[in-house]
Amino acid sequence: MGNIKLSYVLKRIAGAVFTLWVALTINFMLPRVMGGDPTEYIASTVAMGSREYAASLREQFGLDKGVLEQYLRYLAQLFRGNLGLSFSMFPVPVASIITRAIPWTLLIVLSSTLISFAVAWILGTLAALKQGKVFDQIVVGVSFYIQSTPYFFVGMIILMSLSFYLGWFPMAQAMPVGIPPGTPWYLLIGPICYHAFLPVLSLIVVSLAGRMVMMRSNILQIFSEDYITLAQAKGLKRSKILMKYALRNALLPSFTGLMLSLGSAVGGAITTEIIFSYPGIGLTIMNAIYNQDYPLIQGCFAIIAVCVVAMNLLADLVYPLLDPRVALS
């Protein structure tokens, strides 16, 4: 594996396992420190607050056991790949709920992340090459303005202007209502992309600015390095210096950010999915919190934790292969 030593790989794997254990432990504790009792909540909605019904639910859900016993059972179930049964939709497995929600989240978050990074790298590079000129000033000025605007405000403006007033796009959901069962999948691609356009656009707008400014700063910093000055003194073309030396080194810091963004993509954008009523993991988490659905909350955050830790570990292992100057032991 080049300059990656086995000891480094083992250390990173051990660190990832420990980080995941801490995240899963916090994941177990968070729903229980929020306050409230899910069994009493369910009893109040379906059994007029019957204490006997709440007690039977508590026993059925295993909440009558001690916290330590619940925690050990929770870890044992996770180790076997069992995320439990949803409280609010009992006895529907949490895994089936998450399986239905993840594709929608990945569609909007992965596509917006990849597009955002690609556009940010291009605009950041052009702004750095045109430092101090009108293009650079406009791009940087607009970026700082967007960064200072709350995300929910950007999403609401996009929704109100392009959907509510102009009527160009739907205001909610991921697919049109009333699609006949058995419709071929290729006929659904257009409607799905049509409904996903606004959520993707809002995610691109709010994430583009910071990534573009980072890329611009990386390019400017690299052009001030001695080896770039030496390449210029040798008479190499600016385009060759940019492609062979500057871009590769400037992309390295952004690579880690891209890997972490892909890892957190499973978590979705809760605000985005709430604003656009998009049925992904983010909206599922919010509904689970409202319903005090412990297993569903824990299942969603467990999937997110695993993905983030895994992508972080992958970035640590791949980074030395991209940058031979990094010698890890």
Image: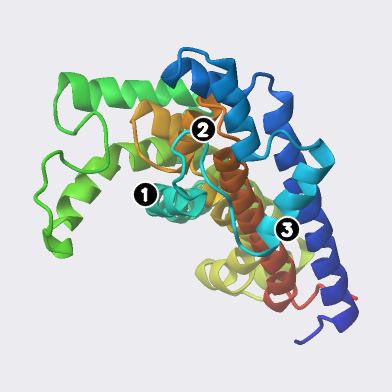
Q: What element carries label 3?
A: helix
The residue located at (81%, 80%) in the rendering is 4
Residue 288 lies, in percent from the top left, at 51, 32
**Residue placed furthest toward the bottom:** 2
Label 2 crowd (10 A; few <14 / some 14-19 / many >=20): many
Q: Is mark 2 on a helix, strand or loop?
A: helix
Classify 152 as above or below 327.
above
Label 3 crowd (10 A; few <14 / some 14-19 / many >=20): few
The residue located at (61%, 57%) in the rendering is 307
Q: Is residue 148 visible?
A: no
Residue 135 lies, in percent from the top left, at 43, 39
Q: Is residue 24 visible?
A: yes
**Which is more toward the observer, 272 or 289?**
289
Q: What element carries label 1?
A: helix
Say left or right for 163 vs 266.
left
Residue 91 lies, in percent from the top left, at 46, 44
Residue identified by numbered label 3: 76
Amino acid type assigned to the residue bearing label 3 in the image: Ala
Label pair 3/1, CB-CB below 8 angstroms: no
Label 1 crowd (10 A; few <14 / some 14-19 / many >=20): many
Q: Earlier in the sequence, mark 3 or mark 2?
A: 3
**Which is more toward the observer, 82 or 239?**
82
- Distance of label 3 from label 2 (alpha carbons): 22 Å
Residue identified by numbered label 1: 104
**Residue placed furthest toward the top:** 48
Label pair 1/2, CB-CB below 8 angstroms: no
Amino acid type assigned to the residue bearing label 2 in the image: Ala
Give residue 231's quadrant in the image.
bottom right
Residue identified by numbered label 2: 288
Q: Which of marks 1 and 2 is nearer the N terminus?
A: 1
